[in-house]
Image: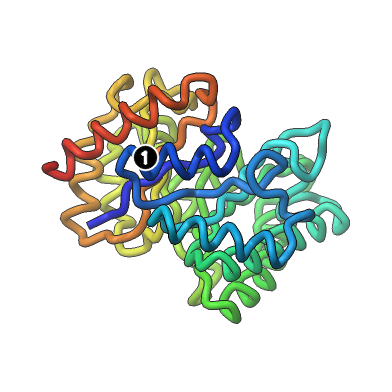
């Protein structure tokens, strides 16, 4: 059975200690830690800090994963920038070094998955092949480092990015073969990029899924709505994961709702418990 969890980016008004207590007492068994200044600064955290956090995670019986979607971590003026798809080598190297640091943090905390995405193309004069080849070249050292640490990379298609849909993922996956590479699926994104058949689209990639984010969606808008407040058939989607034998983390991602996190942490857990038959 999958492990219910919550992404810390939806708890930005809580300290990491408060977040651990809130999730543990609400019945969660996993925490997706978004690297950033609020909960775990990747550049400032020491080995001692990570060991302390690892012990706290164990005490609260929360399995960690590492999320790398902090909005302004690398550039305080431009969201999600730079990326592995950036046109400049300097930008790609900065993102690459961040992902390698994220892998080291994952290993120190006992996390098995680091979730990443492609980013956008900032140079419309580049051809499709050129952007994809650049992305693959930048990603391969990250995958090699992950493999050396026993970590899987969950690559997430993200609306508006170079790899935004499951069809994009399938094409991309045919061009890169690496044992550390797996698929992160955000179920809410299916309502945006796979709105014609979210369930069928998910079923077509179930054998590649290693990590799940869950939120709802309405009118094909990428808004990360609370569970059950959109149009997605989340019981069917999560049911497909259950039937497939998925045993990874299923993380509620409500990154725009930190101001009402206690309410949504509880509400989301009750929703997931209903799908678990609890």
Disc 1 crowd rating (10 Å Cα; few below 14, some 14-19, many 20+) is many
Q: Quadrant of residue 210?
A: bottom left
Residue name at image x 59 percent, y 28 percent: 13
Q: Quadrant of residue 138?
A: bottom right
Q: Secondary structure under badge 1?
A: helix
Q: How many marks?
A: 1
Q: Residue at 33% across / 38% down in the picture?
A: 26
Q: Quadrant of the C terminus?
A: top left
Residue nearest the observer in this picture, 278 or 141: 278
* Residue receiving disc 1: 187
Q: Is residue 11 visible?
A: yes
Where 277 sits versus 107, above or below? above
Q: Is residue 264 above or below residue 49?
A: above
Q: Find residue 274 and report its horizontal and vertical position in percent.
A: 16, 36
Residue 25 x/y as whole percent: 35, 40
190 w.r.t. 183: above or below? above
Residue 9, image quadrant: top right
Residue drawn at the location 79% of the way across and 33% of the way down: 78
Q: In the rendered image, is residue 170 in sight?
A: no
Quadrant of image for the N terminus:
bottom left
Model colouring: rainbow
Query: Which sits in the foreground, 40 or 200?
Result: 40
Residue furthest to the left in view is 277
- Residue at image position (74%, 62%) is 46
113 relative to 264 in the view: left or right: right
Residue 145 in the image, given as x and y percentages of width and height: 65, 75
**Residue 197 relative to residue 107: left or right:** left
């Amino acid at each position: 059975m999958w492990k219910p969890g919550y992404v810390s980016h939806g708890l930005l008004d809580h300290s990491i200690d408060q977040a651990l207590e809130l999730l543990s007492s609400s019945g969660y068994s996993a925490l997706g830690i978004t690297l950033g200044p609020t909960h775990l600064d990747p550049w400032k955290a020491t080995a001692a800090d990570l060991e302390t956090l690892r012990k706290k995670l164990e005490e609260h019986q929360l399995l960690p994963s590492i999320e790398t979607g902090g909005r302004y971590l690398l550039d305080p003026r431009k969201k999600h920038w730079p990326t592995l798809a950036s046109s400049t080598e300097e930008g790609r190297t900065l993102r690459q070094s961040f992902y390698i640091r994220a892998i080291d943090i994952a290993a120190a905390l006992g996390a098995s998955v680091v979730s990443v995405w492609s980013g956008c193309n900032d140079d419309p004069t580049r051809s499709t092949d050129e952007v994809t080849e650049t992305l693959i070249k930048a990603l391969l050292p990250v995958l090699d480092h992950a493999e050396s640490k026993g970590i899987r990379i969950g690559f997430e298609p993200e609306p508006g990015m170079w790899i935004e849909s499951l069809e994009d993922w399938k094409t991309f996956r045919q061009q890169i073969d690496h044992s550390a590479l797996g698929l992160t699926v955000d179920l809410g994104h299916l309502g945006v990029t796979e709105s014609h058949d979210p369930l069928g689209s998910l079923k077509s990639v179930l054998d590649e899924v290693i990590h799940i984010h869950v939120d709802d969606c309405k009118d094909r808008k990428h808004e990360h709505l609370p569970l059950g407040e959109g149009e997605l058939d989340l019981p069917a989607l999560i049911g497909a994961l259950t039937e497939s034998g998925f045993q990874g983390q299923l993380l509620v991602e409500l990154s725009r709702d930190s101001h009402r996190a206690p309410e949504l942490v509880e509400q989301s857990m009750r929703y997931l418990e209903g799908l678990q038959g609890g």
